[in-house]
């Protein structure tokens, strides 16, 4: 690998981590769309900052753009508070307005400079290593790596300091407020850091990929864990994995790096969506199938429970009476036998003691819906997991 | 008044978009009572609690908790919001939710440690949920979720408890378990304020009641004021409830 190659991957990885962290909280707060809005509406801020400084990496530009991001959030909330439109409509009203102001500003005044709408929307990671940070003649590395590195360090520090506050205000706004952790301060703090991250990242990866890097890793890890800390770590992992593998995908296809990273993010999500152990599509389908079989099992056991007379419990008779297809009947009988719930003598089926217990506990649960007694059954049977 | 005053509300008015939801509420709650706030839908019951706790800003009026503003007395107050107000798919466990109750005494930045964990486990035990401490909260039944919320309030070790509809969507066993814990709190000298819907159980569960319908209709001991007259004034129809049955 050449030096620029390593630098590009490093920038992509740092951007991915810096985006994944606020992204987790945005997803949990059901504010994914806000990141989309911010990423577009910072354009006028960037353009104004650029007119003043003539430098795309100036801190003033980041501050101005971040302020535009906050203005977006405030405007959305303000429109929403009138009660005339819902949040999604408010978002849809605000960000195109701000974005179009930016587009017009560029068209009128910046036609001949290195700032165009394409660059803002799509970015170009491949060019990032050419823009160096020089200090008294010494090359310190790509500028965007420094910008994103500083943003990442700030994000990490804020996360470590205010993890508990962010958690409680995300989960329960009312409690957070009653305990004295102002939800407004935390909300605007999160919005500020999201805006700053988007601004810092847009030049390298573009406004669209920023949204993907914020939302996709969080959405993916949400399917895999029920622990906020693990969700943060997994998001970082998925983000970095997609960034690096996306870079090599682009290298191999000779395509846009940003586009390839987005594609990888999408693929990773798709894989997890299909194969996640509990919430994945396949796991859910398997669970539904198992639940159907278990309902049949219970029906079968209840039938045995209701009939003492042997002819009612003869295997052939069962098939006629319960009226199931052969395969289904066999699945159910096998499952009952495997769990020692029934015994079969001379083709006559009877409940074992365990089967008797099981049936009465299950029956009680169905009638009363109290689940104290069935707790131990939850591990073996999907039926009781609600 | 037989006891110290726990909560005093003066001329409290709250409005959403200029429409008053609570109008000029004066309310005095003595220490060590178990009080129900009753009233029809939209009467402002939840809003009253939220305004007392500073979650909603009133447009007029003041609140004091043991003689001082709520800001200065946060440590004395625990709050259980409506169960439906949070997202139960949030990636966290029962124990972790209870631990959130300790955040208030920790203040900003400081993290919960062993002491807070121990207190949280004890609170879970008190509500009969210790076995579920590591269960993801979406995997709990409605009643179990409400118990976790109650444990979170208990761990705050407060003097005053505000609970917004703790019996909504819970089974009968949980309802009895919760009310028994609330009665214990009252015995220990704590003040408990509950937004309540089931008028039938008011005389059995509570010793103090406030009738609310945008304005305060009446407040006082259940034995003295829980009658047809006040029910009719609050609900606007002749509400026949067998009181003192």
Image (cartoon, helix red, strand yellow):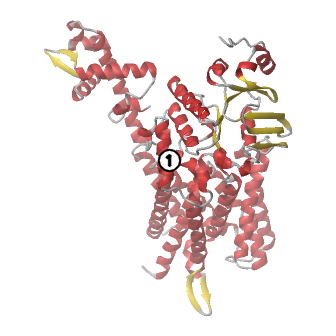
Q: Residue at x 54, y 40 (%)?
A: B88
Disc 1: which chain?
Answer: B
Q: Residue furthest front?
A: B2
**Lateral position of residue A132 relative to residue A8, left or right:** right
- Residue A26 vs residue B22, the one in the foreground: B22
Q: Residue at x 73, y 75 (%)?
A: A60
- The image shows residue A352 at horizontal and vertical percentages of 22, 20
Q: Characterize the local packing of mark 1: few (<14), some (14-19) or many (20 or more) Cα atoms within 10 angstroms.
A: many
- The image shows residue A317 at horizontal and vertical percentages of 24, 10
Q: Quadrant of the C terminus of chain A?
A: top left
Q: Residue at x 71, y 79 (%)?
A: A55
- Residue A224 vs residue B232, the one in the foreground: B232
Classify residue A159 by image quadrant: bottom right
**Lateral position of residue B93 relative to residue A183, left or right:** left
Q: Relative to residue B64, is residue A365 depicted above or below?
A: above
Q: Residue at x 35, y 22 (%)?
A: A361
- The image shows residue A366 at horizontal and vertical percentages of 42, 21
Q: Relative to residue B220, is residue A79 depicted above or below?
A: below
**Lateral position of residue B171 relative to residue A34, left or right:** left
Classify residue A335 by image quadrant: top left
Q: Quadrant of the N terminus of chain A?
A: bottom left
Can the viewer see residue B170 in this picture?
Answer: no
- Residue B89 vs residue A186, the one in the foreground: A186
- Residue A285 vs residue A342, the one in the foreground: A342
Q: Relative to residue B4, is residue B237 depicted above or below?
A: above
The residue at which mark 1 appears reads as B119
Q: Relative to residue A285, is residue A313 depicted above or below?
A: above
Can the viewer see residue B10 in this picture?
Answer: yes
């Amino acid at each position: 690998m050449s030096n620029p190659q390593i630098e590009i991957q490093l920038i992509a990885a740092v951007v991915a981590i810096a985006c994944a962290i606020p992204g987790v909280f945005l997803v949990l707060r059901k504010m994914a769309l806000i990141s989309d809005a911010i990423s577009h509406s910072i354009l006028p801020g960037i353009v104004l900052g650029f007119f003043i400084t003539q430098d795309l990496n100036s801190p003033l530009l980041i501050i101005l753009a971040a302020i535009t991001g906050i203005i977006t959030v405030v405007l959305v909330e303000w429109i929403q508070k009138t009660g005339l439109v819902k949040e999604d409509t408010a978002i849809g009203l605000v960000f195109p307005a701000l974005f179009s102001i930016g587009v017009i500003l560029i068209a009128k005044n910046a036609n001949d400079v290195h700032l165009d709408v394409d660059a803002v929307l799509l970015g170009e990671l491949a060019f990032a290593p050419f823009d160096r940070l020089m200090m008294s003649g010494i090359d310190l590395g790509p500028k965007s790596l420094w910008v994103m590195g500083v943003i990442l360090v700030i994000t990490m520090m804020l996360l470590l300091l205010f993890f508990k506050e962010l958690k409680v205000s995300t989960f329960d706004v009312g409690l957070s407020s009653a305990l004295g952790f102002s939800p407004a301060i935390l909300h605007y703090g999160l919005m500020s850091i999201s805006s700053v991250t988007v601004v810092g990242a847009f030049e390298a990866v573009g406004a669209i990929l920023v949204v993907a890097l914020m939302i996709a890793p969080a959405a993916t890890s949400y399917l895999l864990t029920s622990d906020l800390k693990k969700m943060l770590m997994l998001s970082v992992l998925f983000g970095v994995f997609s960034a690096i593998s996306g870079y090599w995908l682009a290298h191999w296809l000779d395509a846009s790096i940003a586009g390839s990273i987005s594609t990888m993010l999408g693929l990773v999500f798709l894989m997890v969506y299909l194969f996640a152990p509990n919430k994945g599509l396949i796991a859910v389908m398997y669970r539904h199938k198992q639940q159907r079989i278990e309902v049949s099992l219970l029906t079968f056991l209840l039938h045995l429970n209701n009939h003492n007379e042997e002819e009612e419990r003869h295997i052939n008779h069962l098939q006629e009476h319960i009226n199931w297809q052969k395969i289904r009947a066999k699945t159910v009988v096998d499952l009952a036998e495997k769990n020692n719930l029934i015994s079969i003598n001379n083709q006559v089926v009877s409940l074992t003691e365990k089967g008797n217990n099981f049936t009465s506990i299950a029956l009680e649960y169905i009638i009363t819906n109290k689940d104290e007694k069935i707790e131990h059954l939850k591990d073996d049977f999907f039926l009781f997991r609600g | 008044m037989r006891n110290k005053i726990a909560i005093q509300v003066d001329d409290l008015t709250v409005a959403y978009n200029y429409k008053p939801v609570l109008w000029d509420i004066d309310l005095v709650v003595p220490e060590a009572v178990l009080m129900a706030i009753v009233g029809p839908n939209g009467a402002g019951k939840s809003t009253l609690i939220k305004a007392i706790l500073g979650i909603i800003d009133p447009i007029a009026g003041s609140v004091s908790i043991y003689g001082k503003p709520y800001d200065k007395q946060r440590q004395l107050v625990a709050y259980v919001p409506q169960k439906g107000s949070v997202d139960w798919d949030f990636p966290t466990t029962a124990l972790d939710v209870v631990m959130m109750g300790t955040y208030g005494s920790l203040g900003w930045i400081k993290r919960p440690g062993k002491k807070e964990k121990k207190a949280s486990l004890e609170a879970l035990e008190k509500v009969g949920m210790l076995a579920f401490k590591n269960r993801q909260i979406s995997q709990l039944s409605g009643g179990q979720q409400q118990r976790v919320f109650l444990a979170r309030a208990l761990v705050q070790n407060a003097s005053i408890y505000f609970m917004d509809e703790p019996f909504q969507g819970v089974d009968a066993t949980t309802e009895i378990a919760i009310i028994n814990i609330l009665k214990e709190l009252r015995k220990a000298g704590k003040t408990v304020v509950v937004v309540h819907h089931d008028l039938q159980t008011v005389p059995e569960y509570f010793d103090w009641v406030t009738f609310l319908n945008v304005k305060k209709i009446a407040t006082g001991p259940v034995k003295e004021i829980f009658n047809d007259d006040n029910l009719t004034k609050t609900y606007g129809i002749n509400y026949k409830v067998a009181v003192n049955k």
